[in-house]
Amino acid sequence: MTMDTFNGHKPSSTTPNSSQRLLPRQTTCQPQPQKMLSQIRAILFVLGLSLITITIYVVWQNTLPLISPIALIDVITGHSTASKSPKIIYGFFPYWNSKYANELNINFLTHLAYFAIDLNPDGTINKINVKKEQEPGWNKINSNAVEKLLYQSKLLGQKTILTVTAMDPELIESILENPSNSRTAINSIMEIYKNKNFDDINVDFEYVGKPETTTRSNFITFIRNLKNACRTQNKNCQIDVDIFADTATKDRLWDLVGLSPVVDRFIVMAYDYSRKSSSQAGPVAPLTGKCNHQQSLPCLDQDIISHLSQITKIVPPEKIILGIPFYGYEWQTAGKDFLANTYPGTGSLASYSRIQSLFSDSKISSLSAMWSQTTLSPYLVFEKGEETHQIYFENSESLKQKIKLVKSANLGGVAIWALGYEVPFGELWEPIKNISTL
């Protein structure tokens, strides 16, 4: 509200007031006390009005309602014009959830990613583990349950994706830094890709720590060569790369500047901000809540929006797929407060079905469902015997906020980690299947 609209006119010190207009014309040059008094009154009027206006403005600024971070999306993209383009709904199906294959609701997916086959240091597929048993990732991809699910996905017109993993720094270095091992890895991947009739490939090389510059460069070369090999088989083949959420702020394996022209989609693993081993209970995927000079305690070291704001400075937003969790973590805690300290060794993964089961567990007392406006995520506090427990997780409302972010920031879509954790409940699918209307 401007001063003009607030007062109905723009005050001016040169406009005479009514008392001045009633004064008779004076013919003497001597000082006129009444005229001087009127001028002083006019000056005081203007000063008083200015003070009132400033006071109103300050009060208004301090009583503004809190603005949703979704409305401040220009922090990420520099604008807030939502794209109307269709969004990708990407679901990771891990081999250890294959028992739920017949119960999954995949109708709303656009992409189904099997997770995963693992590579050996020489680039061959890991088919036999250290116990001389068949590696489960390789074993399950050949099971009837997985083959049936992939076939169903094809019938629905979805893209099927082969996920390839390497989870150890030395393993990754062995594959990337030896040209022979790299060629073997690409040939091994392409053999399964062709035999199982996959559409795309997802590369999940999770290098924990700071790699050498040559390792980062070799990864770009590996992705480029893999894409060329895949395009030879299928001209529409796309290569996706999974990245940590802090990739743009730390020296990670993924050189986003070098990878961006080559990679078709980046899956941002925007979860595990708190882990089983965390010393404090906390949200798995906090959309907001990072500490700043205006943030009151308690607050967090990092959040999703701050990480995305850095990634989108390098990678086009439409190439970014936001990873969303279908799980949470549970800890025994030292109290009931938000972000309470945890007891070492008590952390465990909590699937959505585990969370729902608590509401009917007779051994659980004083169960409280809470919502953190700081992080835009839910959590539970309950008593189990003499112990206090907390679970931080995702529900339909927190996922709804993330999907609004995806749309407002013009990101490419969402990636669910992981299919099966929600079975048999359907609530988490509500905001996802309505992604076009949120």
Image (cartoon, grey):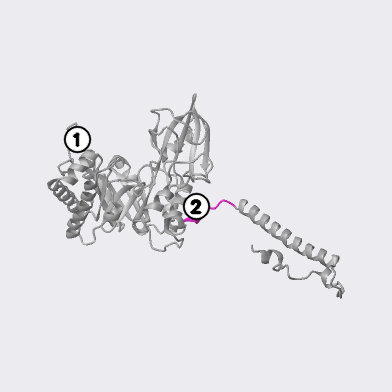
- Judge whether residue 143 is colored magenta: no
Instruction: Compute the Cα span from label 1 to label 2.
Output: 46 Å
Q: Is residue 119 visible?
A: no
> Disc 1 residue type?
Asn
Q: Which residues are magenta?
A: 65-73
Q: Position of residue 392 (x, y in %)?
A: 45, 38
Say which residue appears at 52% left-offset and 42% top-offset.
Answer: 371
* Up-down relation of residue 98 to residue 31 (above or below): above
| Image quarter (top left, top right, bottom left or bottom right) of the N terminus | bottom right
Q: Are marks 1 and 2 in contact (CB under 8 Å)?
A: no
* Up-down relation of residue 382 to residue 76 (above or below): above
Find residue 239 and name its label.
none
Dot 2: what SS?
helix
In the figure, is residue 301 to the left or right of 52?
left
In the figure, is residue 414 to the left or right of 69?
left
Q: Position of residue 409 (x, y in %)?
A: 42, 57
- In the image, 309 versus 323, the foreground residue is 309
Q: Is residue 280 visible?
A: yes
The numbered mark, 1 or 2, whose residue comes first in the sequence reads 2
- In the image, 105 versus 33, the foreground residue is 33
- Judge whether residue 68 is colored magenta: yes
Rendering quarter of residue 18? bottom right
Say which residue appears at 69% left-offset and 60% top-offset.
Answer: 50
Q: Which residue is mark 2?
A: 69
Q: Which residue is mark 1?
A: 129
